[in-house]
Image: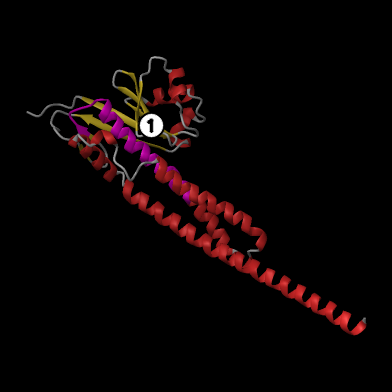
Amino acid sequence: MENKIQQDILFVAVEIPTTIQRGDLEKEFPTLILTNIENSLVGEVANNKFLFASSFGVLTFCNFSHNEIKSILARLNIKDANNYETALINQDYPMILDNNFQKPEIDANTIKYNKFDKSIASIISLVLSQSVGLEKREKSLEVKMGEIKKIYEKIEKLQIKDRKELMKFAGSIAKERFDILNQLYLLDKPDIIWDDSELESLYNQLSYQLELKNRFEVIEYKITHLKESLELATDLVNQKSSEYLEWIIILLIGVEIIFTIYDFFIR
């Protein structure tokens, strides 16, 4: 006879407008013991209830009801706390504790495993927060793709005065790429899985299900496209600037010739 399912645990990752600091959590939860994982904070609020605060603006709840999540978001002064499910980017993933699964098994709908502790909660929370963090970047890049489309629609009409805005836009794209590489940690596995094959399997499977690497590659492609498109527009403006300077030089030379002729023939 198969063992019955023992418990269901829900993970919910929610984007937040600002990064939650250690002091914010300690103020609201004085008994909370916080530890660090990959520059993020994890703490046990109650028995088997964990909060995971990422350094890139995502808060992940482990084993909380939706009403409890709303309450905590409100206590942390997060706007739209009461309707976070529609107003904020969020993603949930249920975990089923079942003695039949000696190793973690993950599909598109559930995580199945026979163990649950702070390390497991941290790994799942980290991957979910990375997924939500990527979605934030995906939406941000979609806006920028719309902006570059508008630039291309008027590319022949770009003038020297537009160079400042183009450089500002280029800076925002560079910052976007830096933040992705520096904050989401998608290229490095967390340290706590190196000596634990089951935690590594959990991390790899969940990353695969959420397509983190593929989505990251798409983001990289879009950033490269934006960069190349901006370089083309900037080169065009710089060319116009060079032509403008050339005409000024020609005009000055012409004026100089006129004055030379005037001095020679008239005076």
Q: Nearer the viewer, residue 236 or 146?
A: 236
Callout 1 environment at 10 Å: few (<14), some (14 to 19), or many (20+)? many
Q: Say above or below: 226 vs 136.
A: below
Q: Nearer the viewer, residue 45 or 32?
A: 32
Residue identified by numbered label 1: 40
Question: Which residue extends farthest bottom?
Answer: 265
Q: Left or right? Give the position of 200 relative to 233.
A: left
Q: Say above or below: 76 vs 134.
A: above
Over which residues does the magenta segment extend? 112-141
Residue 96: within the magenta?
no
Q: Secondary structure at mark 1?
A: strand
Q: Left or right? Give the position of 192 relative to 23.
A: left
The amino acid sitting under disc 1 is: Ser
Find residue 44 and report its horizontal and vertical position in percent.
33, 21
Residue at the image position 58 percent from the left and 55 percent from the top: 167
Q: Main secondary structure of the magenta part?
A: helix
Q: Say above or below: 214 vs 118.
A: below
Residue at the image position 29 percent from the left and 40 percent from the top: 189
Residue at the image position 61 percent from the left and 68 percent from the top: 239
Q: How did the renderer colour the structure? A: secondary structure
Q: Left or right? Give the position of 194 relative to 229.
A: left
Q: Which quadrant is home to the C terminus?
A: bottom right
